[in-house]
Image: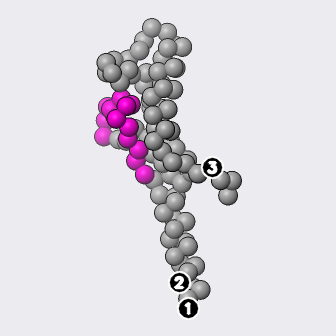
Amino acid sequence: MLAKTIYSLNNINKNRENMKTPIFSEKAPKPVGPYSQAAKAGKFLFVSGQLAIDPKEGKIVAETMTLQTRQVMENTSYFRQNTPLSNSQE
């Protein structure tokens, strides 16, 4: 009975690791719609639809594709900085 309970608790903990958690950063641009800026599921961090918005001015950086790419990568870096992800190779 004890072994079965421990097995069940271990499965619950594994399932919690795989749940999706919304991620928000005050440094990144605010979402334009009713969705989160990013989401963590297990060991993965998902971002999509990121625009080249300068969060300080709230405007899209539109001079060149290079500047837009840099802005998007800077914005997504705020999610990675504040989200603990496992480095283990399980």
Q: In this view, does 78 lie above or below 18?
A: above
Q: Are marks 3 and 1 in contact (CB under 8 Å)?
A: no
> Which residue type carries mark 2?
Thr
Q: In which quarter of the image is the C terminus?
A: bottom right
Q: Position of residue 5 (x, y in %)?
A: 53, 84
User: Of helix, strand and loop, which mostly describes the magenta segment?
Assistant: loop
On residue 87, the disc is 3
Q: In this view, does 52 lie above or below 33?
A: above
Q: Where is residue 12 in the image (x, y as percent from the top left)?
A: 50, 71
Q: Residue at 33% of width from left, 21% of height from top?
A: 56
What sort of colour scheme is used for the picture?
A: one colour
On whether residue 24 falls in the magenta region, the answer is yes
Among the two numbered marks 3 and 1 on one chain, the one whose residue lies closer to the N terminus: 1
> Which residue type carries mark 3?
Asn
Q: Name the residue under label 2.
A: 5
Q: Where is residue 32 in the image (x, y as percent from the top left)?
A: 32, 31
Work out whether residue 88 or residue 15 is closer to the camera in this orientation and state it. 88
Observer-side mark, 3 or 2, equals 3
Q: Residue at 47% of width from left, 58% of height from top?
A: 19
Q: Mark 1 points at which residue?
A: 1
> Which residue type carries mark 1?
Met
- Categorize mark 1 by other alpha carbons within 10 Å: few (<14), some (14-19), many (20+): few
Distance between the alpha carbons at the discs numbered 3 and 1: 34 Å
Q: Residue at 42% of width from left, 12% of height from top?
A: 62
On whether residue 27 falls in the magenta region, the answer is yes
Distance between the alpha carbons at the discs numbered 3 and 2: 29 Å
> Element under label 3?
loop
- Taking 7 as reference, is 54 left or right? left
Q: Are marks 2 and 1 in contact (CB under 8 Å)?
A: yes
The magenta segment is: 21-34
Work out whether residue 83 or residue 65 is closer to the camera in this orientation and state it. 83
